[in-house]
Amino acid sequence: MNIRENIMTQLAIKGGQRLREQPLPARRTMGEAEKQAVIEVMDSGELSGFFGSPGPQWLGGEKVQQFERKWADKYGYKHAISVNSWTTGLMTAVGAMGIGPGDEVIVSPYTMSASATSILFYGGIPMFADIDPDTFNITAATIESRITPRTKAIMVVHIFGQTAEMEAIMVLARKYNLKVMEDGAQSPGVKFKGKPICGFGDIGGFSLNYHKHIHTGEGGMLVTNDDQVALRCQLIRNHGENLVEVEPIEDLTNMLGSNYRLTEMQAAIGVAQLDRLDGYVAHRQRLAAHFGKQLAEIPGLTPAKLADGAEHAYYLYPVKYDASVTGISRRVFVQAVNAELPPVKVWEQTGFIEGYIKPLYFAPLYQKKIAIGREGYPWSVNTDVEYSYRKGICPVVERMYDKELIYTPLIREPLMESDIDDFVSAIKKVLANPKELLD
Ligand SMILES: *Cc1c(COP(=O)(O)O)cnc(C)c1O
């Protein structure tokens, strides 16, 4: 039976035959170049070149510095500073911006938790701004509505891979004298209006964890065009010890430092991985165009939309789902489509997933306002302000999470257009048989 005939048969979730039995190809990004790079470091015996104390090695070993230079040059940033995760990268960025107790930082609640917890680590207070219902990013308008006299910075997340409207956000930031940080974890290698993201604001960067476009197991890369900001990041990454030697820095805030250093083996892998990034992004953009064209013809499903001037790296592919059009609840639709696809061995082979991340402010951390210590710090710093993370503060995010958004990771290499076609057939099969799903 071919796939077209299968569309007319019983749904797999009801005991029918799956539309596709053949497993989806597994993603594997480590190749010969990475293997050789690791062996070379192994042979040298030098697994980390860092010293915390003053001296030429305070900026790390050969591979770390090579990786940073290569990233900066390739995408046109003045500085790149590697870190051992993007979570510690975000903390470094918040620290370097001079955020302190009681400072408010505006951020999206529809993102990975660290975009906001990094603010709390320095006593900053996350202020959640709503998203645009088409791009899922915060906008200049939603950010402006959250500005108060205590606002110090904006943390812009380029979510799912689509670049946020950085020009308008920078105009706003200048008007209110705010620092701008960019979380590009899901969108490496893309531009907004021709300029690489994470180079608009004061500081930005990317994740190198296993699930991201390119990875070093764990890791992250900060980027900035500002010399002082770069120096502050380098100091925070490496215990702040070298403060006694480097050029006097203007602002000693948050210079206590830690150890967020990447190892030589990871950096060597990163050097090789970087050569793959543009190819991955181009591949995903091709798959997304192919997928989007077909989705656009299916009533009840709205494909990802690209904003004016934006690019998309497709870490994930978001789709808006309208149950009132399809006659099938979102949950049942997702389960039924997934049942048509081969069993999932790794998360990346899942068809659809509902909702994305629960709006961050619903986490106990925000609901109970217990972050550091038991006394409500850092919210307690601003004694005259009543902070509320009640339901309803970001209605678009809540609507996307509760009702409208589904997303798929089936947009990544090594999938091909034919795999996407099977996915679309699975969607069509489910939509063609709504009655079967009623009970
Ligand atoms: C993955 C991710 C992070 C965290 O990166 P790690 O390297 O896993 O610490 C932060 N923000 C966003 C948006 C992410 O997707």
Image (cartoon, grey):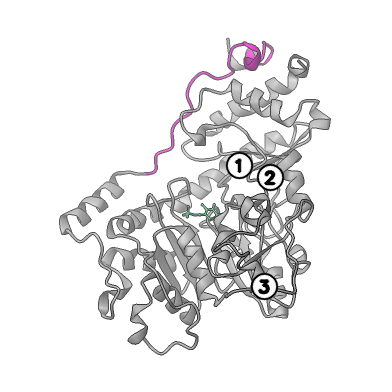
Stretch in magenta: 6-29
The C terminus lies in which quarter of the figure? top right
* Up/down of 352 relative to 209, above or below: above
Residue 323 horizontal side relative to residue 39, left or right: right
Element under label 1?
helix
> Residue tagged by mark 3?
170
Mark 3 residue CB less than 8 A from any atom of ligand 1:
no
Q: Give the label on residue 42, or none.
A: none
Front disc: 2 or 3? 3
Location of mark 2 (residue): 304
SS for tag 3?
Answer: helix
Q: Is residue 23 visible?
A: yes
Amino acid at pointer 2: Ala
Q: Which residue occupies 58% across, 16% down?
A: 18
| Residue at 51% over, 44% down | 283
Please state if 313 lies on the left or on the right of 47 as rendered: right
What x and y, as percent, mark residue 139?
72, 62
Q: Residue at x 30, y 69 (%)?
A: 60
* Labels 2 and 3: the sequence-earlier one: 3
Amino acid type shown at disc 3: Met
Q: CA distance from mark 2 to mark 3?
A: 25 Å
**CB of residue at label 2: within 8 Å of ligand 1?**
no
Residue 299 in magenta stretch? no
Q: Main secondary structure of the magenta part?
A: loop
Position of residue 406 relative to residue 91, above or below, is above
Where's the N terminus, which quadrant?
top right
The tag earlier along the polypeptide, 1 or 3, is: 3
The residue that label 1 is drawn on is: 288
